[in-house]
């Protein structure tokens, strides 16, 4: 007699007031392949865990964003936010799509140059720029976005001995009616500081004021705040023109567009509430077009959005290390994905999918990482099917920040693989090895005796 | 292991504990094990029955059965030995 | 006149001591002389009393919380629609409105009608935007400020006279008489509901409420004002009475005309002893006390259904003043077999 298909026995308590079966999804979605390549095959070749970047999704998302703005405004320029993901292959894809580079440190600046970005297509942001950084940026004709008065005076001093004129913009912070108000970067609009900075730049002989920049916050769920910000920058541009007869070449609206990930504490999932590129584009471009800036003098619109462009293109594949019951009988799983490589699990409720057909029965489960630390939790609570040790899981939407903010801890950071548009896999960052770390370390000579402990 | 008497289970997997008023939702395998327990079978007998009927390896089955019984005990559905 | 047979789905069957509007809405529909409804209850939780109220709800389906994501949520609605051929859905709970508003087109593609405010109307009347809303439409709203840090609190003394109302982002409000109390409530509210905390000018007076229905083109189809007579410790009305107040009706009609409000709404208004009216909140849906309006002569649930179906309606032009409602609780008897059926099959 043929044996029946086995399913692990499950008992769930029905809680009054809490829907069980019918409060849950009808079928557990399975993510068995990425861009047509079986997840299993990726792991066989590159190990677990492994990050995967989809060229197809990356380009499609960029083109969608680009279209949203281009169709509404005459001059639009994207600049790839290096800090979001500065793997060279990723940056080069964006440069190939026409993006400039937006960097916030000397390291990122050099990385952009090394990726073949000309100096005059680099935007240099951030509060930390050394005198050497500034000198280099002036000489390369990069756009320097000034963050504070100390930097402005350094620039005035340095530019006296350099050519050409330094191309500068100021970063402006403001009240756009949202919380939290980001007032630690740039010059404040409401108290007149931004206007003072503009005046000082216009008086400096070797500085050319080319742009106005703002970056109102991160993960903005309301497009309207951008409309408020764009109007305020437009107002500064008009005032500058009136007083100095000088037109501002570009307005940089920064980034901060939300991705479809769900923030912890949010009631509705991010994919339902996240504004679309069209929503953001509509808010920003109508504010600029409806401003008092003369139509023939409309500045170029710069955008530095990072997260919303790259998040969907990144996946993290991992495997189940163990199933556990906690002391309160709660189901838990240990994955080989820790918070050190999935930093964003601190603020997102990441979706997690099994990579193979599984039982349709789910249990309220906690997903832990493999680190020997209590904070290593990927999901506090998720309705999840039972998987066996060694089964694979896929976490979508991890393209932003994880591959730059990750930490090496107790093991090596994993491989990163790019799947190109022809479904071919390319290793774009190698898993680290003991050699990599040994190379960085130096042992003082007196500790160099061969074997400190006898076998 | 012995299930508390008077615990009612339906074919559809709905189980009611009259001592506490709690209700539970079980899958087919779970229902089957409960029935075996009600019939007074030992863990070994249950393992043998299931092994014969289902396509499953010994160790997984053993691991799953003991986990299930631990849950019954957690929900206070077993007679104290 | 023959009554029209319609399949109408209704949420908010949580007819507890903090009741949802579902059951009062159904009572309105049952008493209609134009509609002969088959009522499909949509329940989130398996002990919502409405599920077990035979004679009011013909059939109940459990639905997942919108939190699960609109795709899965709509999947369930489609399943129910396949079985029940829904003509209209009346969502009655705040937390689900966003999802239903966003899904309006998709639902209408399935032949399901709704009659809800636009997303823009829904957003601009929200608690944290209400002050701007008042300025835009020329309605007095107590001056308020969102507070996000202790620094902000110190600055309040320049902008407010004490006492002030300190309100949580979603719920709860306290009256504070000095800065120390504001700080105390700020800590309490921010730890419970997150930031921002809203500090609002305290308006002394009587709270009055209006339930109203706008046709989406500026016309007020129905409006009935009520004063709460007795309030529970949860701040809910236990008894209320319809009142005659032309000013309230004028404010309501004005607001609906200017905003072109679509659907039902409840206005919460404070009337001061000096005869000033301050808007303190707009709920973008039918309130739980709507049956009082039905009894006073304006069957708002019925009108909402007809508007959803695209009918042109003449506005109600009167209501009975002095009609009262007194809420009571009542122990129904159920059986574990009903609970089993609902829990295992998701329908009853």
Image (cartoon, coloured by chain):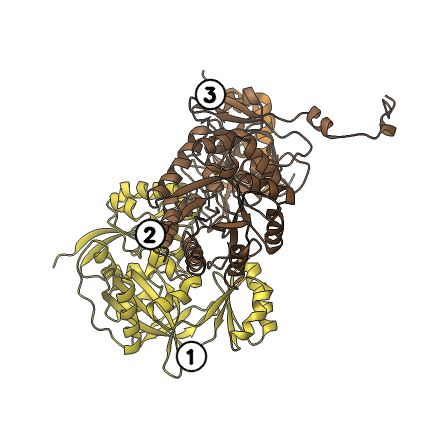
Chain colours: A brown, B orange, C yellow
Front-most of residues A47 and C108: A47
Chain assignment, label 3: A
**Residue placed under numbered mark 3 in the picture:** A424
Front-most of residues C178 and A438: A438
Residue ID at (27%, 61%): C301
- The relative height of residue B55 versus residue C127 in the rendered view (above or below) is above
Q: Are marks 3 and 2 in contact (CB under 8 Å)?
A: no
Q: Are marks 2 and 1 in contact (CB under 8 Å)?
A: no
- The relative height of residue A278 versus residue A386 in the rendered view (above or below) is below
Looking at the picture, how far across and down is residue A233, in whole percent? 44, 55
Q: CA distance from mark 1 to mark 3?
A: 71 Å
Q: Which mark is in front, 2 or 1?
A: 2
* In the image, farthest residue toward the top: A1
Q: Which mark is in front, 1 or 3?
A: 3
Residue C205 tag number: 1
Instruction: Give the position of the C terminus of chain A as an image quadrant.
Output: top right
**Residue placed under numbered mark 2 in the picture:** A295
**SS category of the residue bearing label 3:** loop
State whether residue A339 appears in this view: no
């Amino acid at each position: 007699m043929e044996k029946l298909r086995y399913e692990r026995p499950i008992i769930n308590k029905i809680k009054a007031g809490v829907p069980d079966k019918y409060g849950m999804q009808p079928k557990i979605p399975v993510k068995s392949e990425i861009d047509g390549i079986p997840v299993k095959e990726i792991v066989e070749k590159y190990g677990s865990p492994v990050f995967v970047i989809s060229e197809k999704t990356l380009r499609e998302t960029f083109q969608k964003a680009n279209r949203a703005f281009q169709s509404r405004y005459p001059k639009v320029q994207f600049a790839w936010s290096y800090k979001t993901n500065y793997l060279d292959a990723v940056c080069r894809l964006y440069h190939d799509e026409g993006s400039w580079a937006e960097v916030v440190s000397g390291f990122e600046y050099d990385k952009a140059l090394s990726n073949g970005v000309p100096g005059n297509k680099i935007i240099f942001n951030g509060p930390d720029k050394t005198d050497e950084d500034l000198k280099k940026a002036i000489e390369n004709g990069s756009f320097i976005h000034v963050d504070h008065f100390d930097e402005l005076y350094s620039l005035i001093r340095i530019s006296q001995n350099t050519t050409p004129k330094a191309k500068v913009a100021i970063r402006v912070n403001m009240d756009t009616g949202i919380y939290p108000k980001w007032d630690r970067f740039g010059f404040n609009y409401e108290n007149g500081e931004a206007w003072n900075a503009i005046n000082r730049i216009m008086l400096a002989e070797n500085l050319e004021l080319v742009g106005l920049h703002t970056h109102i916050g991160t993960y903005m769920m309301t497009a309207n705040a951008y409309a408020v910000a764009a109007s305020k920058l437009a107002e500064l541009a008009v005032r500058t023109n009136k007083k100095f007869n000088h037109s501002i070449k570009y307005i940089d609206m920064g980034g901060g567009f939300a991705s479809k990930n769900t923030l912890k504490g949010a009631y509705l999932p991010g994919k339902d509430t996240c504004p679309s590129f069209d929503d953001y584009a509509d808010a920003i471009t109508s504010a600029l077009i409806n401003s008092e800036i003369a139509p023939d003098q409309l500045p170029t619109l710069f955008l530095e959005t990072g997260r919303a462009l790259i998040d969907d293109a990144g996946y993290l594949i991992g495997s189940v290390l163990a199933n556990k019951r906690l002391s309160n009988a709660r189901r838990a799983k240990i994955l080989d994905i820790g918070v050190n490589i999935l930093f964003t699990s601190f603020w997102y409720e990441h979706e997690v999918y099994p990579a193979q057909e599984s039982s349709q029965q789910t249990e309220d489960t906690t997903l832990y990482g493999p680190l020997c630390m209590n904070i290593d939790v990927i999901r506090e609570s998720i309705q999840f099917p039972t998987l066996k040790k060694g089964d694979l899981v896929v976490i979508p939407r991890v393209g932003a920040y994880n591959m730059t903010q990750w930490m090496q801890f107790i093991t090596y950071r994993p491989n990163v693989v790019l799947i190109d548009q022809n479904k071919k896999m390319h290793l774009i960052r190698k898993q680290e090895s003991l050699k990599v770390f040994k190379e960085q370390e130096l042992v003082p000579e007196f500790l160099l005796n061969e074997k400190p402990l006898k076998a | 292991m012995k299930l508390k008497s008077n615990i009612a289970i339906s074919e559809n997997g709905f189980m009611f504990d009259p001592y506490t008023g709690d209700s539970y939702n079980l899958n087919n395998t779970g229902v089957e094990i409960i029935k075996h327990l009600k019939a007074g079978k030992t863990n070994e007998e249950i393992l043998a029955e299931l092994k014969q009927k289902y396509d499953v390896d010994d160790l997984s089955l053993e691991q799953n059965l003991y986990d299930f019984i631990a849950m019954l005990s957690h929900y206070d559905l077993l007679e104290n030995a | 006149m023959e009554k029209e047979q319609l399949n109408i789905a209704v949420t908010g069957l949580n007819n507890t001591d903090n009741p949802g509007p579902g059951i009062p809405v159904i009572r309105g529909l049952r008493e209609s002389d134009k509609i002969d409804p088959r009522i499909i209850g949509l329940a989130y939780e398996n002990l919502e009393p409405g599920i077990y109220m035979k004679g009011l709800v013909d059939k109940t389906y459990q639905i997942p919380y919108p939190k699960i994501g609109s795709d899965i949520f709509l999947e369930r609605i489609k399943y129910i629609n396949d079985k029940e051929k829904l003509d209209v859905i009346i969502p009655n709970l705040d937390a689900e409105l966003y999802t239903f508003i966003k899904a309006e087109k998709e639902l209408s593609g399935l032949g399901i009608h709704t009659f809800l405010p636009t997303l823009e109307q829904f957003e601009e009347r929200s608690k944290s935007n209400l002050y701007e809303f008042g300025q835009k439409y020329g309605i007095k709203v107590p001056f308020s400020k969102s507070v996000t840090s202790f620094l902000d609190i110190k600055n309040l003394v320049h902008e407010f006279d004490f006492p002030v109302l300190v309100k949580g982002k979603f719920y709860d409000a306290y009256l504070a008489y000095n800065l120390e109390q504001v700080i105390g409530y700020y800590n309490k509210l921010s730890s419970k509901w997150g930031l921002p905390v809203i500090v609002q000018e305290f308006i002394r007076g009587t709270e009055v409420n209006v339930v109203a229905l706008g046709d989406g083109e500026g016309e007020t189809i129905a409006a009935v004002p009520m004063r709460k007579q007795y309030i529970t410790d949860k701040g809910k009305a236990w008894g209320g009475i319809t009142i005659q107040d032309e000013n309230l009706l004028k404010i309501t009609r004005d607001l609906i005309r200017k905003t072109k409000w679509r659907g039902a709404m409840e206005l919460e208004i404070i009337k001061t002893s000096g005869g000033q009216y301050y808007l303190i909140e707009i709920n973008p849906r039918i309130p739980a006390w709507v049956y009082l309006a039905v009894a006073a002569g304006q069957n708002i649930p019925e009108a909402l259904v007809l508007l959803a179906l695209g009918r042109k309606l003449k506005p109600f032009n009167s209501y009975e003043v002095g009609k009262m409602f007194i809420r009571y609780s009542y122990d129904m008897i159920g059986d574990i077999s009903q609970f089993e059926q609902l829990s295992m099959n998701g329908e009853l």
